[in-house]
Image (tube, helix red, strand yellow):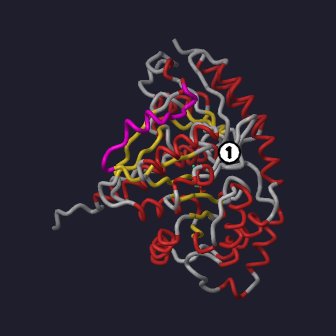
Amino acid sequence: MSTRPRISARISAISESATLAVDSKAKAMKAAGRPVIGFGAGEPDFPTPGYIVEAAIEAAGNPRFHKYTPAGGLPELKQAIAAKTRRDSGYAVEAAQVLVTNGGKQAVYEAFATLLDPGDEVVVIAPYWTTYPEAIKLAGGVQVDVVTDESTGYLATVEQLEAARTERTKVLLFVSPSNPTGAVYSREETVAIGRWAAEHGLWVVTDEIYEHLVYGDAEFTSIATAVPELGDRVVILNGVAKTYAMTGWRVGWLIGPADVVKAATNLQSHATSNVSNVAQMAALAAVSGDLSAVAEMRTAFDRRRQTMVRMLNEIPGVFCPEPKGAFYAYPSVKELIGKELRGKRPQSSAELAELILEEAEVAVVPGEAFGTPGYFRLSYALGDDDLVEGVSRLAKLLSEAR
Ligand SMILES: Cc1ncc(COP(=O)(O)O)c(C=O)c1O
């Protein structure tokens, strides 16, 4: 019998998506009749707007869309994404610089697969979204973390980034608004970071999927537009999921210089070919339409954000800086680790999250999933009543910690 491992080392090294795991455990408990409130999901609780759904229904009846289409995306969608990018962030791109992907996730994978050789280093600001490390690892890249915390609202400085730079650094990953922290860099901070990257000849991969979800006086700044010195060494990742409540439709995109986009399109042509034409036509209606749907969601998210942050900060041992964007709060629970709670003494945020799910029937994602143990991520993209009930349960349970 062969002694060779059944699963390759490369794929064995990939862990399950912790956010999806929490979500599916909560859904399974719910299906079994337990009144679980889930703060795990990274998706709007709104349905996709009707005019977008209508476009998909129409496309499904069109024989042109029953066939293969170009692997890199429908020409009219690429054109519309280029126009939308000019409209929303002032960044001028041609349709040839757009690759339509199967959700933002595929764009993340393809960006790193296309840019990285084994050993190339990527500077990643922690806490980070759970998918980036796996995409970097799969490409043979080496992730170098710059760890931030609640004391700075999870914002990194140029000095911290510089301390992480080596001869092997090729890419800076820049995500604002951030998942999981909701941190949003100001224009000044964005420019300073972009100029630092440009000065050292680094590529910037920037994930702009939460561009339209910023609150209060926070503003979204596209690093690509704000720092022309970066030249063509910028790759933008984006998609329709969060802006138009379209997580299930699976349409995202990657924007970059023509050679990078061509190479990534070659990869996609073998991996998945074109994204479902029906979903692409829905995305075309989304990006060519106005932003009223996201404006409506933003109002609801902003209200829920304020309620959640206030309630979390009232819990002894919990501290939550105000998130300025996306739809997540990222409180520190470090003071509660190791305390006695319902006969147990959780030694990590992961153990505490498990205890909370069992005892309070509330699902949160532990900071371990985002590279920083000692924290929880709670999505506030759920109904107001559930949100209040869920955080109240959390408060009641955690107030018993001794
Ligand atoms: C920061 C960030 N980028 C990209 C994505 C990918 O979204 P999708 O693959 O659903 O388009 C997500 C989803 O959670 C995200 O939070």
Q: Vertically, is 397 above or below 235?
A: above
* Image spot of residue 307 (x, y percent): 75, 28
Number of numbered discs present?
Answer: 1
* Crowding near the residue tagged with mark 1, few <14, some 14–19, many ≥20 C-alpha atoms within 10 Å: many
State whether residue 68 appears in this view: yes
Please tell me in which quadrant of the rendered image residue 26 appears: top right
Q: Nearer the viewer, residue 211 or 270?
A: 211
* Image spot of residue 355 (x, y percent): 51, 29
- Chain part drawn in magenta: 152-168
* Image spot of residue 284 (x, y percent): 73, 70
Q: Which residue is mark 1?
A: 220
Q: Nearer the viewer, residue 27 or 236?
A: 236
Please tell me in which quadrant of the rendered image residue 34 appears: top right
Q: Amino acid at mark 1?
A: Phe
Q: Nearer the viewer, residue 47 or 97?
A: 97
Q: Vertically, is 22 above or below 263?
A: above
Q: Residue at x 72, y 49 (%)?
A: 212
- Residue 357 falls inside the magenta stretch: no
State whether residue 35 appears in this view: no
Q: Is residue 178 left or right of residue 1?
A: right
Q: Vertically, is 204 above or below 288?
A: above
Q: Vertically, is 383 above or below 347?
A: below
